[in-house]
């Protein structure tokens, strides 16, 4: 049993003397005996105590409960109540002061020792817990400050990245627009050369051949610049849904004319239009990007003599388009990358491309709140199906 410095607060001299002898028998040091709350506080102001044995019913202005409240607030030492009463009313009074223990008079030495040990144990554990709570609060406070600082740095970095992306977008747009004009001039000149080559000229065949190469190269560059411009807008969050009324038949003809004019192989595009209305309301530019890219890809990756099937149907205020080819197909292991920018499958061989077409298709479909699915296997071709809500 460890030795403690104990203050006895008891206004009954006989009970105080008995308690003193019992405690001294167990080698505890009695700091003093106070017969009032005021006297107890005076002793504690001048001496350190490990524990206070407190009678509940004290004479004077301060009873045991009020005195304990003051001790808890100022000294934070364990208090063990002494009382001859164990009724519910008395117990309710002492609960609010969070006593370390409660002893009913008369008491025996064994019970007293057990109560003291439990009171000291409870006090130490509470103080350990409080210390841990304080340390935890300090760590949380420090971590909060660190997170706040890190968040400020992250915000600055994101703002800087946004500025860089805006600058990049402006550069891309300006450079791309700068290329458009000379490319248009080159294309016009190549087309004129092609017309002149139709007349009698000793180099008629060569002129026609090279003029066609120039046209195809310019169209390829134009397509690339269009793709770059599109993603410049996408990165700047400027790709918006702008619906307007459009003639569906004329739209489909324009897409097919573009595909047939730009193809460099002998692939036939067979189209079937089912139940199409004359006029719909949608974004014609986004629709054009979707069908032009899907059809041009199917033609490009097909071999001479093969066919591409294009079916467009109107069902329940939706355009349902199916593009099926007999081309090289997409390896299964790479299909999850299909809509990523600049992705090109390993089996494309020498067929040129930017790897941007399908990512443009996916972005346009997302803006239109549509969906796209596909099935493909190597050497057996690919089928794309798109569903786009229109009105």
Image: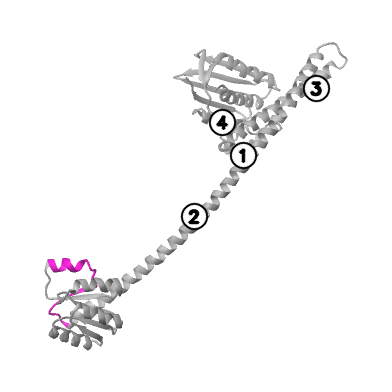
Q: Residue furthest front?
A: 61
Q: Earlier in the sequence, mark 1 or mark 3?
A: 1
Above or below, comparing residue 96 to residue 323 in the picture: below
Above or below, comparing residue 261 to residue 342 in the picture: above
* Label disc, if present, on residue 166 of the rendered structure: 1
Q: Residue 293 location, x and y as percent? A: 61, 26
Q: Secondary structure at mark 1?
A: helix
Q: Is residue 329 left or right of residue 131?
A: right
Q: Is residue 113 visible?
A: no
Q: Earlier in the sequence, mark 3 or mark 4?
A: 3
Q: CA distance from mark 2 to mark 4?
A: 34 Å
Q: Secondary structure at mark 4?
A: loop
Above or below, comparing residue 348 to residue 22 in the picture: above
Q: CA distance from mark 1 to mark 4?
A: 15 Å
Q: Which residue is mark 2?
A: 148
Q: Are marks 2 and 4 in contact (CB under 8 Å)?
A: no
Of labels 2 and 4, the one closer to you: 2
Above or below, comparing residue 27 to residue 282 in the picture: below
* Label disc, if present, on residue 239 of the rendered structure: 4
- The residue under the point 76% across, 18% down is 191
- The residue under the point 63% across, 43% down is 164
Q: Which residue is mark 3?
A: 210
**In the picture, residue 87 is in which quadrant?**
bottom left
Q: Which residues are magenta?
A: 89-108
Q: Nearer the viewer, residue 106 or 312?
A: 106
Which of the image's four quarters has the N terminus?
bottom left
């Amino acid at each position: 049993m460890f030795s403690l410095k104990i203050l006895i607060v008891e206004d009954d001299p006989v009970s105080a003397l008995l308690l003193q002898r019992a405690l001294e028998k167990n080698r505890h040091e009695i700091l003093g005996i106070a017969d009032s709350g005021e006297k107890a506080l005076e002793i504690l102001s001048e001496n350190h105590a490990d524990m206070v044995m407190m009678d509940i019913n004290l004479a004077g202005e301060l009873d045991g409960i009020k005195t304990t409240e003051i001790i808890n607030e100022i000294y934070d030492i364990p208090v063990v109540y002494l009382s001859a009463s164990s009724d519910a009313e008395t117990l309710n009074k002492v609960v609010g002061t969070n006593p370390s223990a409660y002893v009913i008079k008369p008491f025996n030495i064994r019970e007293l020792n057990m109560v003291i040990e439990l009171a000291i144990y409870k006090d130490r554990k509470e103080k350990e817990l409080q210390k841990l709570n304080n340390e935890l609060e300090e760590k949380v406070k420090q971590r909060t400050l660190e997170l706040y600082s890190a968040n400020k740095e992250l915000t600055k970095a994101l703002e800087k990245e946004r500025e860089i992306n805006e600058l990049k977008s402006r550069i891309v747009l300006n450079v791309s627009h700068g290329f458009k004009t000379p490319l248009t001039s080159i294309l016009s000149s190549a087309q004129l050369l092609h017309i002149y080559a139709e007349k009698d000229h000793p180099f008629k065949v060569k002129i026609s051949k090279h003029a066609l190469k120039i046209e195809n190269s310019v169209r390829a560059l134009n397509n690339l610049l269009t793709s770059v411009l599109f993603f410049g807008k996408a990165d700047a969050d400027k790709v918006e849904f702008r619906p307007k009324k459009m003639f569906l038949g004329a739209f489909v003809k324009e897409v097919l004319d573009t595909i047939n004019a730009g193809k460099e192989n002998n692939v036939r595009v067979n189209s079937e239009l089912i139940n199409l209305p004359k006029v719909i309301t949608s974004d014609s530019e986004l629709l054009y990007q979707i069908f032009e890219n899907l059809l041009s890809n199917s033609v490009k990756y097909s071999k001479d003599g093969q066919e591409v099937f294009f079916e467009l149907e109107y069902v329940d205020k939706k355009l349902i388009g199916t593009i099926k080819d007999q081309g090289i197909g997409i390896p299964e292991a790479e299909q999850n990358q299909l809509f990523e920018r600049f992705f090109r499958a390993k089996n494309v061989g020498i067929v040129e491309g930017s790897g941007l077409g399908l990512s443009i298709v996916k972005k346009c479909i997302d803006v239109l709140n549509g969906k796209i699915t596909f099935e493909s296997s190597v050497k057996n071709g690919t089928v794309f199906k798109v569903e786009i809500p229109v009105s």
